[in-house]
Image (cartoon, grey):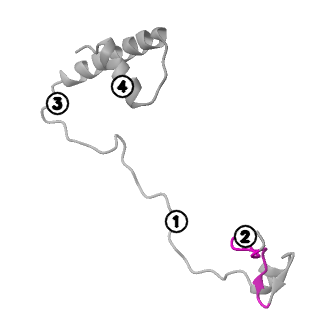
């Protein structure tokens, strides 16, 4: 299977790539090499080969959940620049004063 220069230009246009003629030629060669590899893979006899989603056995590497004591509110707020009641006080980001 081979890809034509016109097809390369079409793919470049779809990808919104502005390529020079030299880049089009280079990309065409690279795509033809890739397609050649795909042709070789398609010729393999895979009869009896089990399909896999991953070549290696994947195990869950996350630790088990365990209940632990959390941070005390006073400790969490200890270094807060400003606080109001028992919460962090932060500057308004959206919908500030009506003068803007």
The answer to the question of whether label 1 and label 4 lie on touching residues, with beta carbons closer than 8 A, is no
Which residue is at the front of the view, 84 or 34?
84
Quadrant of the rendered image containing residue 93 = bottom right
Q: Residues within 10 Å of mark 1 (few under 14, many from 20)?
A: few
Q: Which residue is mark 4?
A: 11
CA gap between label 1 and label 4 equals 45 Å
Which residue is at the front of the view, 6 or 100?
100
Q: Which residue is mark 2?
A: 93
Q: Nearer the viewer, mark 1 or mark 4?
A: 4
Q: Is residue 94 magenta?
A: yes
Q: Which residue is mark 3?
A: 46
Q: Earlier in the sequence, mark 3 or mark 1?
A: 3
The secondary structure type at the circle numbered 1 is loop
Q: Which residue is mark 1?
A: 63
What span is in magenta?
85-98
Q: Earlier in the sequence, mark 1 or mark 4?
A: 4
Residue at x 44%, y 11% (from the top left corner): 26
Q: Earlier in the sequence, mark 2 or mark 3?
A: 3
């Amino acid at each position: 299977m081979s890809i034509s220069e016109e097809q390369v230009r079409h793919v470049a246009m779809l990808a919104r790539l502005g390529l020079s003629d030299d880049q089009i030629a280079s990309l065409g060669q690279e795509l033809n090499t890739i397609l050649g590899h795909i042709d070789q893979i398609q010729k393999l006899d895979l009869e009896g080969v089990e399909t896999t989603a991953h070549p290696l056995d994947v195990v869950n590497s996350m630790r088990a959940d365990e209940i632990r004591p959390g941070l005390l509110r006073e400790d969490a707020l200890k270094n807060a620049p400003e606080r109001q009641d028992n919460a962090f006080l932060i500057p308004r980001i959206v919908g500030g004063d009506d003068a803007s």
